[in-house]
């Protein structure tokens, strides 16, 4: 390969080549960081909530009659829901994973005021919640019907037993190697609660929360105007049952409103709307950017070919083969690209360090840099191929003409 | 001469249609990407009450846990307890004061078949409307007497009035809310402050509430809270009364002062209040009261999402790539014309003349790129709107105003001129007649 002469020829037009190298470097900086962010957001979206999302929907009942008997209304509703053919399980709760609004509590290992040892999302539950949420009870037992009690705005104490997510148990008792069942911790400073069950995974309602995996089921049914039902159907029945059940509940009682009827897919989509949009925007930017840089290389290479038509003709007349003319332009581009991607690698790491510092992003994975280098080298070679081929078609006879 | 350079520029642009369109497109796309993000950021970081920024203050007092600050490093809570909101409101030390919280109610429209529906409600005090310059289409807000008497009186948003009364004037009529009749005292004109500065705790980029009613009435009737509530100490037994007496924070408090000089006086008043409460065994933390202007409060709450900052950094780099691309292409163009240039120099054209000519040409490309860039920005904003289509409020965040249009053109021309500097400088330095030899 004739690197030497090609390199020396390039030094005659330093400005032009430096510009392309710089453009490749900045392109690579953006590409690498955009991909790192896309990866981070995709990982966020991929986290499972713990629910049987494909077969679950939720709706809210708001009562507005002055003297409504909420307890019998909720019992009746749940009875109706559970007896609809195709419904696998149904429960009433205050919230559910990914809903973005809910209840959290600080919890402590010792009773008394002070700093919390951990914090957790609270889901009001009954003996059906484990089945409805489709969570995997890996230790202990489910609630017994007689452990489930009513709660209203006048009650401020906590039930004696709870089921916790494994992440909450691990956070509270990091040194425990055996079972978490039977362990006690405190809610509201001094209300003791005893772990009777541990579920493998159950997310909190806030996807942006650092304690996302920490949640706790509390055997309480709410005697409030506002009740959220969660329904899990047999596979494939969700959509038809959702409409049917909404209709059924609306007709069953005129003194309440049925609203916020959503599939779990809707809930998830809303929760991750920002992440999904960010992925789309960045993908678009990276694609556009690569196209612009590619076109820029095509433009400049074409220009170089037409400016050097005479020289190419002379080389051909002196015996250079077509292949060696093509090779000249390919190697030229390769040299520029290599300078560009090396500078780009350094710039990309610098920008990533800035983003990690300023916006608490995750640091990028090492393999993104070599992958981006490879992509940009390929883009450069493909872009220069057309003009190079045109250069190889220059007739040796050009050399004899004076332009 | 300028007109002549314009003509020359146009000829030169026409001579290389592919190269010229690539340059215009690169500038336009770079400007479009940048301005899309800048526009969203401009809307999101706006201060909708800037004209009263020197007299409005958000009030914070620190009633939090002695062992653990509300937020590191030693920041006071963002909202207020009922105890403090009530005491400070009743003291009436400021020219105007308002305490408010977000709740939700059920409205029963008139008519047999009409279905009731729930809506977001702001429980607030009468000063809310004059303090925040809330515009009225019909009627007005309620008065202080209605606050004192916990009256059943409501103000409707424009949208709600449209839905319930088709936009007619309903002032004086009764609206059924959770089964009880409420007198309608006023209807707002269109009012969508972005961000919703008066309550940043509950989605700063959401729509304002559709119904407003007296805070005193809402509290007396135990209206539930639909916004954020935080407690550091368990609530005693005793239902809503116990909750009102608790250290839980859930209320937003704002004051209006006659002028900024009264801030010190109000601060002294707050300090004296907290000292007095300390005697009663509350406020275990050191004195940590804060008064923030709306601008400071928006800054303090960091309402603009980090994502916008990340995208802005990437969009600026994107513009840099587009400009490098343009510089490269302009340079190529100049080099191709090296012979013309050296001939013109040989015939007596000065460097300044050549500089003017090429800068005019670059300016034309910049202007074209800027104009196309506005279209690209518009497309970019529509794209973002589409990505967030499930989020109702997005239409208010993707609006372009004239300042953004002008900024787009300015940025485009500036970019193109900046990009033209190096190639033009190279052109001016082509020695006369150097290219005229037969090679």
Image (cartoon, helix red, strand yellow):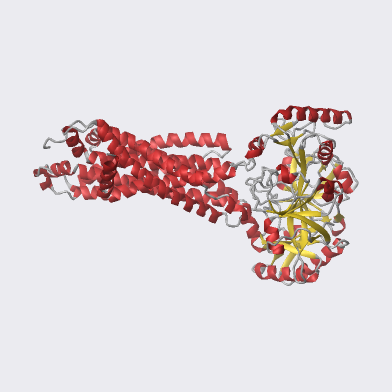
> Residue A35: image x %, image y %?
49, 45
| Left or right of residue A4, residue A175 in this image | right
Q: Nearer the viewer, residue B192 or A146?
A: B192
> Residue A77: image x %, image y %?
80, 66
Task: Point out the image quarter for the C terminus of chain A.
Answer: top left
Q: How many marks?
A: 0
Point 71% across, 28% down: residue: B261
> Residue A221: image x %, image y %?
83, 56
- As displayed, is residue A95 above or below residue B63? below
| Left or right of residue B417, residue A45 in this image | right
Q: Nearer the viewer, residue B72 or A196?
A: B72
- As displayed, is residue B224 above or below residue B230? below
Q: Nearer the viewer, residue A195 or A25?
A: A25
Point 83% across, 49% down: residue: B146
Q: Is residue A401 visible?
A: yes
Task: Point out the image quarter for the N terminus of chain A.
Answer: top left
Q: Is residue B229 visible?
A: no
Quarter of image, res A312: top left
- As displayed, is residue B197 above or below residue B158? above
> Residue A112: image x %, image y %?
85, 36
| Left or right of residue A95, residue B330 in this image | left
Q: Nearer the viewer, residue B434 or A353?
A: B434
Point 80% across, 70% down: residue: A252
Quarter of image, res B332: top left
Point 55% across, 43% down: residue: B42
């Amino acid at each position: 390969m004739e690197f030497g002469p090609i390199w020396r020829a390039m030094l005659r037009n330093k400005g032009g080549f430096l510009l392309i190298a710089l453009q490749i470097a900045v392109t690579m900086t953006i590409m690498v960081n955009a991909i790192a962010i896309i990866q981070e957001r995709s990982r966020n979206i991929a986290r499972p909530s713990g629910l049987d999302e494909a077969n679950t929907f939720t709706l809210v009942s708001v009562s507005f009659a002055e003297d409504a008997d909420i307890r019998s209304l909720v019992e009746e509703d749940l009875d109706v829901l559970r007896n609809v053919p195709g419904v696998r399980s149904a429960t009433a709760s205050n919230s559910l994973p990914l809903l973005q609004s809910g209840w959290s509590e600080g919890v402590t290992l010792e009773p008394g005021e002070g700093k919390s040892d951990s914090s957790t999302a609270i889901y009001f539950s009954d003996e059906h919640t484990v089945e409805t949420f489709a969570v995997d009870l890996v230790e202990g037992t489910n609630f017994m019907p007689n452990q489930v009690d009513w709660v209203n705005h006048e009650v401020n104490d906590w039930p004696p037993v709870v089921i916790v997510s494994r992440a909450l148990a691990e956070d509270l008792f990091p040194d425990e190697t055996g079972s978490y069942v039977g362990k006690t911790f405190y809610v509201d400073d001094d209300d003791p609660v005893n772990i009777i069950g541990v579920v493998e995974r159950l997310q909190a309602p806030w996807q942006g929360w650092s304690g996302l995996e920490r949640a706790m089921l509390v055997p309480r049914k709410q005697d409030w105007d506002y009740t959220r039902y969660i329904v899990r159907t047999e596979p494939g029945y969700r959509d038809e049952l959702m409409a049917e059940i909404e209709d059924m509940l609306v007709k069953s009682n005129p003194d309440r409103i049925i609203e916020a009827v959503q599939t779990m897919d809707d809930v998830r989509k809303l929760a991750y709307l920002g992440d999904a949009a960010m992925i789309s925007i960045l993908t678009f930017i990276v694609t556009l950017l690569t196209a612009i840089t590619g076109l820029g290389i095509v433009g400049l290479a074409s220009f170089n070919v037409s400016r050097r038509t005479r020289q190419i003709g002379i080389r051909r007349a002196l015996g250079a083969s077509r292949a060696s003319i093509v090779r000249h332009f390919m190697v030229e581009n390769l040299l520029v690209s290599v300078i560009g991607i090396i500078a780009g690698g350094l710039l990309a790491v610098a920008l990533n360090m800035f983003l990690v510092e300023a916006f608490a992003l995750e640091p990028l994975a090492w393999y993104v840099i070599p992958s981006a280098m490879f992509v940009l080298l390929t883009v450069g070679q493909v872009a220069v191929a057309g003009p190079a081929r045109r250069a190889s078609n220059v007739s040796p006879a050009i050399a004899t003409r004076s332009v | 001469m300028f007109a002549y350079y314009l003509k020359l520029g146009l000829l030169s642009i026409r001579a290389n249609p592919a190269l010229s369109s690539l340059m215009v497109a690169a500038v336009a796309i770079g400007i479009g990407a940048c301005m899309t993000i800048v526009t969203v950021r401009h809307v999101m970081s706006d201060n909708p009450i800037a004209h009263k920024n020197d007299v409005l203050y958000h009030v914070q007092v620190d009633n939090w846990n002695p062992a653990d600050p509300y937020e590191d490093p030693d920041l006071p809570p963002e909202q207020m307890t009922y105890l403090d909101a009530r005491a400070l409101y009743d003291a009436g030390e400021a020219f105007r004061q308002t305490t408010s919280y977000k709740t939700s109610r059920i409205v029963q429209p008139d008519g047999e078949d009409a279905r009731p529906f729930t809506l977001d409600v702001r429980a607030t005090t009468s000063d809310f409307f004059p303090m925040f310059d809330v515009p009225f289409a019909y009627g007005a807000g309620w008065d202080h007497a209605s606050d004192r008497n916990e009256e059943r009186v409501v103000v409707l948003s424009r949208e709600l009035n449209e839905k319930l009364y088709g936009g007619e004037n309903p002032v004086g009529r009764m609206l059924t809310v959770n089964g009880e009749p409420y007198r309608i005292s006023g209807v707002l004109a269109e009012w969508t402050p972005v961000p919703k500065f008066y309550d940043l705790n509950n989605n700063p980029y959401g729509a304002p509430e559709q119904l407003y009613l007296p805070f005193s009435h809402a509290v007396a009737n135990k209206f539930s809270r639909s916004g954020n509530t935080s407690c550091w100490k368990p609530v005693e037994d005793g239902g809503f009364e116990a909750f009102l007496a608790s250290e839980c924070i859930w209320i937003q408090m704002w004051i209006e002062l006659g002028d900024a000089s009264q801030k010190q006086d109000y601060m002294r008043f707050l300090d004296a209040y907290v000292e007095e409460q300390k005697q009663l065994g509350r406020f275990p933390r050191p004195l940590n009261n804060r008064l923030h202007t709306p601008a400071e409060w928006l800054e303090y709450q960091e309402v603009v999402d980090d994502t916008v900052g990340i995208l802005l950094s990437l969009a600026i780099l994107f513009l840099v790539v587009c400009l490098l691309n343009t510089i490269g292409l302009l340079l190529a163009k100049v080099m191709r014309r090296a012979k013309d240039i050296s001939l013109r120099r040989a015939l007596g054209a000065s460097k300044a003349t050549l500089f003017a000519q090429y800068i005019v040409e670059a300016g034309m490309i910049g202007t074209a790129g800027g104009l196309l860039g506005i279209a690209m920005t518009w497309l970019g904003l529509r794209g973002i709107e589409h990505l967030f289509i499930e989020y109702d409020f997005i239409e208010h965040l993707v609006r372009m105003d004239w300042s953004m249009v002008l900024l787009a053109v300015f940025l485009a021309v500036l970019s193109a001129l900046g990009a033209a500097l190096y190639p033009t400088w190279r052109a001016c330095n082509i020695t006369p007649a150097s290219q005229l030899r037969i090679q």
